[in-house]
Amino acid sequence: MLHVDAYSELVAHSKELATLQSFSALLGWDQQTYMPKGGAAFRGEQLALLAKLTHAQATHPRLGEWLNALNGAFAEGTVEAANIRELTHGYDRATKLPSRLVEELARVTAIAHEAWVEARKANSFATFQPHLETILKLKREEAAIVRTAEHAHLYDALLDEYEPGASTADLKVLFPQLTAAVVPLVKAIGESSKQPDGTILTRDYPTDRQKWFAESAASAIGFDFNTGRLDVTAHPFCCTIGPGDCRITTRYNPAMFNEAFFGVLHETGHGLYEQNLPAEHFGTPCGMYCSLGVHESQSRFWENQVGRSRPFWQGMLPRMKQAFPGTLDDVNLDAFEFAINAVQPSLIRVEADEATYNLHIAVRFELELALITGDLTPADLPGAWNDKYRDYLGIVPTTDADGCLQDVHWSFGGIGYFPTYTLGNLLAAQLQQAMPNADDAIRIGDFSGPREWLKANIHSHGRRYRAQELCTRATGRALSPLPYVEYLKEKFGGLYGV
Ligand code: ZN
């Protein structure tokens, strides 16, 4: 009976921790949406106090005692065993790190973030370089401390924070397979005589109509506005406060249709995952998303596999023409579908299209891995970055601001984060291949097929299985770049005639 008591105490503790974290989430959401500027300083104090309380709760010695007592107490495969596995994983990581290192990382990255903002503005890599050197040193130290027997490579210990179970060895196979297929495809697309008319998307799209149209699409897909809302922020995100309260954001540009619309579909995908997590497991791993990669697979699936598909617009384009009277009178389905699927190698990751996006990630993965192993020194980063852009995208940044200074991730120590974007994109394509074809229903605005399939195969499991096992259970095989490559070839081959 003893372990039953320990387990219920563990769950109660875990729920309390999640509730503390939900306060931070709510304050963070408010900070980015409605908080007046003058509230910033006090908000900082509120969040700092919550961070302290949260850390104390997450590293409480009782937690270690319960987890020890419960080690092996439940049969493999049960919800209880999964919760204990994941809570032990989080607790070990949190308690292994000496507070000296945690505080130093927090201090160094806070300064580095400011330095990065300035360096990017001034296009001066040299001023960011010493900060990057310190971050790399600390992240290597962190990785060496949290590394476990299952981490064959030092970088595995960093991946572990965002994508538990992912391995450097797998990524070193996966990325070259991907680039080998996508680089020539993108090149052929660029050389094709068939090119889309992108001006269709930069006509007059009043913000209030965009808002109405995007909300109606999110709603049609299944985002529940009784348990969620959509607001405006400078940087779009999805944030869960708790069961029954998931909030997404976007930004509108009245001279650009696709940014807000596909942004909303993307966040809707994240939101559906959060809204469909089993509420009865709230506060424990089985009530949480599996990994960042799996989360991104959900957003990309609705944004790209569904939202940029022909069946979707067969149903949606007539409604769009009603929402923006007169704007698209001369535009047919072929032209519209082509415009929203334009492929154009660019320097900036966040503006990249579906076909070139993962090439940007391949560059970052290869470089950050080399930085961690020491095969690349920070001083040589700008040159190495530009070489890889030439190789993969056929273009070279003329400034570091548009090159290796463009992303925030390294400045906050987020090394091991980038690969999760690509893992998500690959999984989205593999999930679509595995689920029953729903094109006919999607044409008439019925999205229940993929939505329910994802709920049953992904959302309802929370963190019960690691991402690798979840993928195999849902799709019948390990994650592979092939479904994604096939998807790209079929889609863009058709559009561009390549
Ligand atoms: Zn996302």
Image: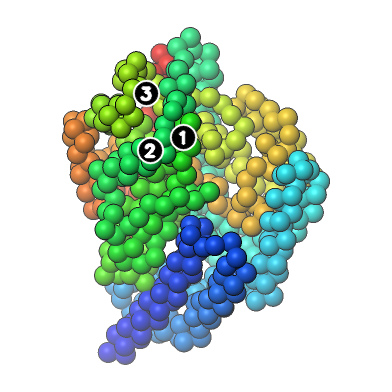
Q: Is residue 26 left or right of residue 345?
A: left
In the displayed structure image, the side of residue 175 where residue 300 appears, left or right: left
- Look at label 1 and name its amino acid: Pro
Position of 437 compared to 478: left or right? left
**As displayed, is residue 91 above or below residue 249?**
below
- Ligand 1 is within 8 Å of the C-beta of the residue at disc 2: no
Residue 416 higher or lower than 489, as above or below: below
Residue 379 shown left or right of residue 79 in the figure:
right
Q: Quadrant of the N terminus?
A: bottom left
Q: Which residue is farthest bottom? A: 2
Work out whether residue 496 can be spotted.
yes
Residue picked out by circle 1: 254
Residue type at the position of mark 3: Thr
- Foreground residue, 246 or 190? 246
The secondary element bearing badge 1 is classed as: loop
| Lower position in the chain sequence, tag 1 or tag 3 | 1
Q: Which mark is residue 132?
A: none
Q: Which residue is mark 2?
A: 210
Which x, y percent locates residue 218?
A: 31, 45
